[in-house]
Image (cartoon, rainbow, N blue to C red):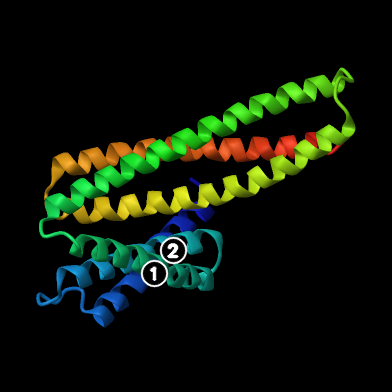
């Protein structure tokens, strides 16, 4: 490992600590009287701050780490707050986790179906591109199809953002569930999270393919 990479790694480790310790003091995360909901929100803030600071340290200077920590803490608090609010709706934690599992399963089914529809359309566009090369369809037809591709691409990017947000939410639920020792349910959530990652990668590939087709159809 080069000395520069070693320095960056040390900086990525030390900066989150410099952010987390003050946050622990300011939020009183170690206070025994802290409610479960407040603790969940605070832990989300700290995890977000650590991740943001580490990323900022690796890609920028000290200011980059501080900015990353600030942005990460905001995002972390948002997810921690959302998880705490959802959990509070259920009398038993088991019921909340079962509902979270069903939600994750549905999210995966939805994005899987969406990917299948996109891939079908992509295959049809590939066929049209071949027909155009054979002079069997007009330029106007290609341009009309390009407009549809651009609309689908914009929608796919929105779907991708929603899926990435759902993945972060699933991780926040997993982090909360681990504290209660619900190992069987955590494993099910982990499996759904793994499936979501795969579907997100497929969706990323599909959006990239749509971008390429948009260029191809701009005849």
Label 2, secondary structure: give it.
Answer: helix
What's the distance in space between the residues labelled 1 and 2, CA to CA?
A: 7 Å
Res 86 quadrant in image: bottom left
Disc 1, SS: helix
Q: Nearer the viewer, residue 132 or 179?
A: 132
Residue at label 1? 73
Give the mark, 1 or 2, whose residue is nearer the N terminus: 2
The answer to whether residue 23 shows anywhere in this view is yes
Could you say where residue 102 lies in the image, as x and y percent from the top left?
Answer: 27, 43
Quarter-of-image position of residue 93: bottom left
Q: Position of residue 37 (x, y in %)?
A: 20, 69
At horizontal 34% and vertical 69% (from top left) the residue drawn is 77
**In the rendered structure, are the residues bearing label 1 and label 2 in contact, judged by CB atoms less than 8 Å apart?**
yes
Question: In the depicted view, which residue is nearer to us: 47 or 209?
Answer: 209
What residue is drawn where x is 14% and y is 43%? 183
> Which percent across, then down, holds residue 217?
80, 35
Quadrant in the picture for residue 85: bottom left
Q: Which mark is residue 52?
A: 2
* Rendering coords of residue 98 (x, y %): 19, 46
**In this view, the mark in front (1 or 2):** 1
Against 151, residue 43 (above or below) is below
């Amino acid at each position: 490992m080069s000395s520069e990479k070693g320095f960056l790694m040390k900086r990525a480790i030390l900066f989150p600590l410099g952010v987390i310790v003050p946050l622990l003091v300011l939020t009183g995360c170690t206070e025994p009287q802290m409610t479960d909901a407040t603790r969940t929100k605070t832990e989300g803030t700290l995890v977000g701050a650590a991740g943001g600071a580490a990323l900022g340290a690796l890609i920028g200077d000290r200011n980059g780490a501080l900015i990353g920590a600030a942005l990460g803490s905001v995002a972390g608090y948002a997810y921690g707050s959302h998880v705490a609010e959802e959990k509070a709706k259920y009398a038993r934690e088991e019921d909340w986790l079962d509902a979270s599992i069903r939600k994750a399963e549905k999210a995966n089914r939805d994005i899987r179906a969406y990917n299948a529809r996109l891939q079908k359309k992509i295959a049809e566009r590939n066929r049209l591109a071949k027909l155009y090369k054979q002079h069997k369809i007009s330029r106007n037809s290609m341009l009309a199809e390009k407009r549809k591709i651009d609309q689908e691409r914009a929608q796919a990017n929105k779907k991708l953002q929603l899926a990435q947000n759902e993945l972060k939410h699933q991780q926040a639920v997993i982090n909360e569930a681990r504290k209660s020792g619900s190992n069987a349910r955590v494993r099910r959530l982990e499996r759904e999270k793994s499936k979501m990652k795969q579907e997100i990668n497929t969706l990323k590939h599909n959006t990239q393919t749509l971008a390429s087709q948009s260029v191809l159809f701009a005849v």
